[in-house]
Image (tube, rainbow, N blue to C red):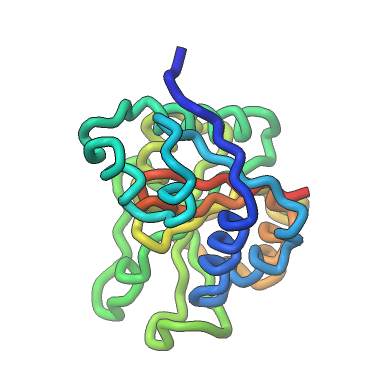
Amino acid sequence: MLSVITYEHGLAAKRYVREELSRFGGLRRLLGERDLDSARVFSFLPFLPDKQYLERFDCSIFDSFGGWEAVDHQYAAAEMEFITRFLQSDPRHIALFQADFFRVASRDKPIRLAPGERAFLYRRKEGPPADTPLEMWVYVEPQEASKDTIGTAMMRGSWHRGIGALTSLPPTLQTITPLAEMPETVVLELARQAAYITVNAYDAEVLLFCELR
C-alpha cells in the first residue's frame, strides 16, 4: 500500500495552474482556455505540510520536512499509476508532456529522442521564446504504457515550467509519427478533449492534476 496522501487543493492551486498555462503560448495557451474555475486540482503528497508551504508551490514544502531526501518517494509511483490507469481505460487516450525548449532550439543539430521516447512537434503562432517557435511534446499511448515509458516521458517533461495533458486522440488522427509536426486542427482537439492537465509544482518534484469538468 502506497504511503501517500491525495490532497485536494483550493483556489491558490487554480491560480498557480492558470499562471503556468499563460506562459509561452501554443498548446499551453489552448489548455488555459478551458474552464479552470470549475476544475478539481489534486496531488499525491508524501506527507501533509502546513498550508503556508502548500500554497508557495516551491521546494520549501520539502524543506519543512527535512529536505527532499527525507521524504518517502512512493508518491511519484502514485502519479505514474494514475497516468497508467488513465491510458489503459481507453485505446484513444494519450498522455502528453511538454519538453524544454532547448531540445528544439538548435537549427543545426537533429532532434534526438531517448530510447523508448516518442514526441511530436507543434509550431505555435504566438508566445516566447520568439526564436524557438517549435514546441516538443513527449507522448505515451496505451499500447506502450509501462513504468519505464511513462517514467521517461515524465522525466523529459520535468523542467521547471513543464506541463502535460491527459487527453484523447481526435477521430481524424489514427497514429502519430514520431517527430511529426502536428497541424493546428489536431492540437486544438487535443486541448479540447483533455480530461486532466498536469502542472509541475514544488520545484518540479510534484505533479498537480487539474481535472477538467
Instruction: Say which residue appears at 66% left-offset and 69% top-offset.
Output: 30
Instruction: Say which residue appears at 60% left-offset and 34% top-offset.
Output: 87
Compared to 104, does 207 lie above or below?
A: above
Residue 16: percent from left, percent from top = 54, 61
**In the visual, does 145 lie left or right of 147?**
right
Instruction: Say which residue appears at 29% left-offset and 36% top-offset.
Output: 65
**In the visual, does 173 lie left or right of 24?**
right
Which residue of the protein is positioned furthest toward the top in this rendering?
1
**In the visual, does 18 lie left or right of 55?**
right
Residue 55: percent from left, percent from top = 48, 53
Looking at the picture, tell me which residue is in the foreground, 172 or 212.
212
Q: Is residue 175 visible?
A: no
Which residue of the protein is positioned furthest toward the bottom in this rendering?
130
Looking at the picture, tell me which residue is in the foreground, 177 or 203.
203
Q: Is residue 136 visible?
A: yes
Residue 94: percent from left, percent from top = 60, 44
Compared to 208, does 23 lie above or below?
A: below
Residue 98: percent from left, percent from top = 46, 59
Instruction: Say which residue appears at 55% left-offset and 31% top-offset.
Output: 6
Looking at the picture, tell me which residue is in the foreground, 75 or 173.
75
